[in-house]
Image (cartoon, rainbow, N blue to C red):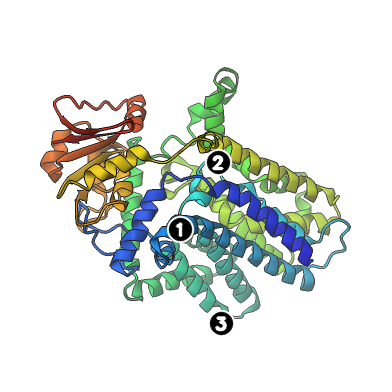
Amino acid sequence: MIIQIFIVLVISIVLRIMFIIFSSTDEYSHLWLINLIKRNKSIDQKIVSDSIIKGYRGYPPLPSFIISILPKKHWVFIGKIINIVYELLSILFVFLVTYYLFENIFVFKTDIMTPVIAITLLYGTAPILFPVSYTARLSRIGGDRTISTFLCLIYFTSFGIAFICDLYWLYIICAFAGILIILSSQFGLQYILFTSIILSIAYLNVIPIAIILLTILLAILIPRCGVKRLLLRKIDHYGWYIKANKNKKSNVWDRNRLRDIVLMPYYFLKDIKKFINIFTKKITITIVIYSMPILIIILLWFVINPDNFYILLKDKITLFIFVLSLSSIIIFIVTSLKPFLFLGQAERYFEHSIFYFDLIFILYIYRFKLNENIILWVILFQIILVLFNFLFKNIKYFKMKLYDRKEVEFDELISFLNKKKSMRILTIPTKMNFKIATHIDEKRHKYYYDNISSKINGIRYMDEDQIILHYIKSDFNYFKMKYGINMIIIKKGDIKYASKKGIRYNFKGLEKVFNNKEYSVYKL
């Protein structure tokens, strides 16, 4: 058993290392947040001193706080490695829970692989944990998405034991894990909240929703954590996303369009690049087909022989596992609908529930004596899908790694800005502000940051100022009058991207004070 679990961990580590070696587009916003927390010496939501918009960031601070404890020179390396650490904690947790279940409750004779190793390996190689549709899960700094998965496993495992076995003291662990989730991941909070609501409905019992609501209340009452501001900012963010989706400004507004679904066969024949983009990023059901092979198999079994599931679900523990799995399916369906796209990428909810599908898959195979070779084939298929995900998303970055990628042009830009004082800076795209500010003393300049929540207007200024997310209106005088902007920094490649989106920027008449291959700076 020890050798087997060691092999599982090695496979899991190797697969994940491939994904952390490349950069995420969110990398510098997280480095900036780590730096902000380091300066403030607190996880509380304080006013951002170098922001043109007066307000606070309103992002879950715990993962960044953990990295901020370390010396700054190690932030990027440890910030990425910690993703693997959190993933390994999840895998080990899955192993321990599965070991207890199949040693004490579900006992089967096996020929090829023990249920414990099978489930742990299925979980460790699940393609949904190596997503194509949003690559930042493993490559972003801080590990907010990976720690969320681990904490959600703890939350519902503790809750399940407490709920089924009447071990009420375990609800304390639920509350503790829930508070950590609130401080770590907005998406994780959504998952435990929505799942708890469905559990209460399914069991006709108020306890699931009561526990999560009590956990949120306790988190709000904890001093110097800024949870109230976090939640208010999240509500404000919902409002912005609803409006942005309606006005086609967000990055998810074009998901699950009927036109794309109908025309997929045409794209397959005439425009294979567009077909692949829609198949892997835009249509949630196709994303799940290649990301969750376990789910597809379970659904096929249910259609072929639903009576087997009625037999399987007579046990209280299996029923609870099934309800958790069904909850994520319901959440996926609801959040795939256009009115609820503001709740995030629908397939991401399966990150937190894939373990429960793995349990059902293995229980079904051993309970009804199916061919155990199915497990080996599914594991092999999952590994192939993960490798495909890696190649599909990272081949162009892999090619770039073959050449010198030192950011000489960016260093030149920073050197230029360090010679200036008291500039009010606007960048195109706006998220570049975070990268620049991370390399410059916070007292030197002020920046137009995205997602700064003010007490009066929240983040509504983004809707007023931006045509699409991160790309401002083309009227530079508007920003000079409204915010006192006196310097515009552009990244040339992103200006070309904006042009493809129909956004035209005219820099004629502006004084160009800096220029190199990648960046230009204009004075207003």
Which residue is depicted at the point 50% across and 35% down?
403
Mark 1 and mark 3: span between their CA atoms? 31 Å
Provide the residue designation for mark 2: 132
Q: Residue at the location (22% across, 53% down)?
A: 51
Q: Residue furthest top?
A: 270
Q: Nearer the viewer, residue 460 or 413?
A: 413
What amino acid does circle 3 point to?
A: Trp
Query: In front here: 61 or 406?
Result: 406
| Callout 1 amino acid | Gly
Badge 3 is on which residue? 169
Judge depth for marks 1 and 3 and give the one in front.
Answer: 1
Residue 99: name its quadrant: bottom right
- Identify the element where label 2 is drawn: loop
Query: What residue is shown at x 52% (from left), y 26% (from top)?
Result: 274
The N terminus lies in which quarter of the figure? bottom right
Measured as percent of width and height from the top left, residue 257 is found at: 47, 32
Counting from the top left corner in percent of width and height, residue 110 is at 87, 60
Q: Seen in the image, is 224 located left or right of residue 104?
A: left
Q: Quadrant of the C terminus?
A: top left
CB atoms of marks 2 and 1 within 8 Å: no
Front disc: 2 or 3: 2
